């Protein structure tokens, strides 16, 4: 049985080996699975490949710089493919993201890319989203208001902290809530409801964005490809 890191590594490296070619501009995600994809891109660049990346967080930007991967802005060049991890993947390819707090920029990169590839180990496949608390990015001034609005219907709302009392601050200078909604029947409807609350910047629900999911499991990396029944790409 492979351990979780080995599975993350297998998914991250498979995404680069299968989908990234010399000359491409690619989006690079955030987190412990994306780390292995970034590392693989660094190896290709070191071997002479002309790959440019749009990082989805300051942490990923730092990893790219360390690996000498050239960085560019969101719309400077067409992004052929964006590769990122996820906290949950539902059967219709909806995602929970933002465990690492990078949901807003991750969604920017996924939206801008021609193809969005999600890399996970099999533990992330779920029958429906919601066991993982949904991250919600909030303008700090509006934090109490947003907490009141969400917790009126769903009491499990927690302000994310960076250990102790210090509130977590996103790369965009915002606060983060982690919200327990229970099993989410309609992630698109919930995303729209959350984004309609004044002060909410984004929710870590990714709907109709995923093209392909690479699932690492003992024995290999399985590829799930979007079909007409698993939702349309925006
Ligand atoms: C960060 C994310 C990550 O992609 C998600 O949390 C998965 O991370 P990991 O691969 O470390 O489990 O959305 O904001």
Image (spheres, rainbow, N blue to C red):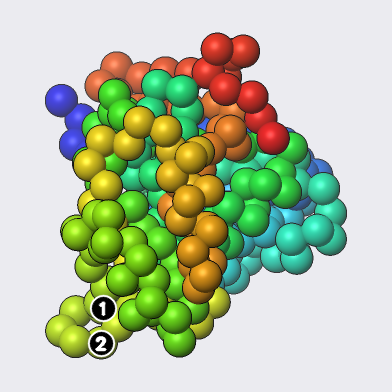
Left or right, 199 with respect to 215, comes to: right
Where does label 2 land, which residue?
Answer: 166
| Label ID, residue 162 | 1
Residue 185, image x, y percentages = 35, 31
Residue 221, image x, y percentages = 40, 22
Residue 117, image x, y percentages = 56, 35
Work out which quarter of the rendered image holds the C terminus and state it.
Answer: top right
The one of 30 and 65 positioned closer to us in this rendering: 30
Left or right, 147 with respect to 196, comes to: left
Q: Residue furthest front?
A: 152
Question: In the picture, residue 154 is in which quadrant?
Answer: bottom left
Work out which quarter of the rendered image holds the N terminus and state it.
Answer: top left
Residue 69, image x, y percentages = 65, 61
Instruction: Please tell me which residue is depicted at 55% across the width and 26% down the height of the picture.
Output: 212
Instruction: Please tell me which residue is depicted at 34% across the width and 44% down the height of the picture.
Output: 87
The one of 10 and 81 positioned closer to us in this rendering: 81
Evaluate if marks 1 and 2 touch, with contact meaning CB atoms under 8 Å apart. yes
Left or right, 219 with respect to 70, comes to: left
Local secondary structure at mark 2: loop
């Amino acid at each position: 049985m492979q351990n979780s890191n080995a599975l993350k590594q297998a998914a991250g490296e498979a995404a680069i080996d299968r989908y990234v070619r010399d000359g491409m501009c690619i989006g690079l995600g955030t987190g412990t699975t994306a780390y292995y994809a970034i590392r693989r891109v660094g190896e290709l660049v070191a071997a002479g490949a002309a790959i440019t990346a749009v990082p989805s967080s300051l942490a990923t930007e730092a990893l790219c710089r360390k690996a000498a991967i050239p960085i560019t802005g969101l719309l400077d060049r067409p992004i052929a493919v964006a590769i990122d991890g996820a906290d949950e993947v539902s059967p219709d390819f909806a995602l929970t993201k933002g465990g690492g707090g990078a949901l807003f920029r991750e969604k920017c990169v996924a939206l801008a890319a021609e193809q969005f590839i999600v890399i996970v180990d099999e533990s992330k496949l779920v029958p429906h989203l919601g066991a993982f608390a949904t991250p919600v990015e909030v303008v700090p001034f509006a934090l109490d208001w947003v907490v009141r609005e969400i917790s009126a219907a769903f009491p499990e709302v927690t302000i994310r902290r960076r250990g102790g009392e210090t509130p977590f601050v996103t790369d965009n200078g915002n606060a983060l809530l982690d919200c327990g909604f229970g099993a989410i029947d309609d992630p698109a409807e919930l995303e729209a409801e959350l984004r309609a609350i004044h002060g909410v910047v984004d929710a870590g629900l990714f709907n109709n964005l995923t093209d392909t999911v690479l699932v690492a499991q003992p024995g290999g990396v399985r590829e799930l490809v979007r079909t007409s029944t698993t939702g349309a790409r925006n």
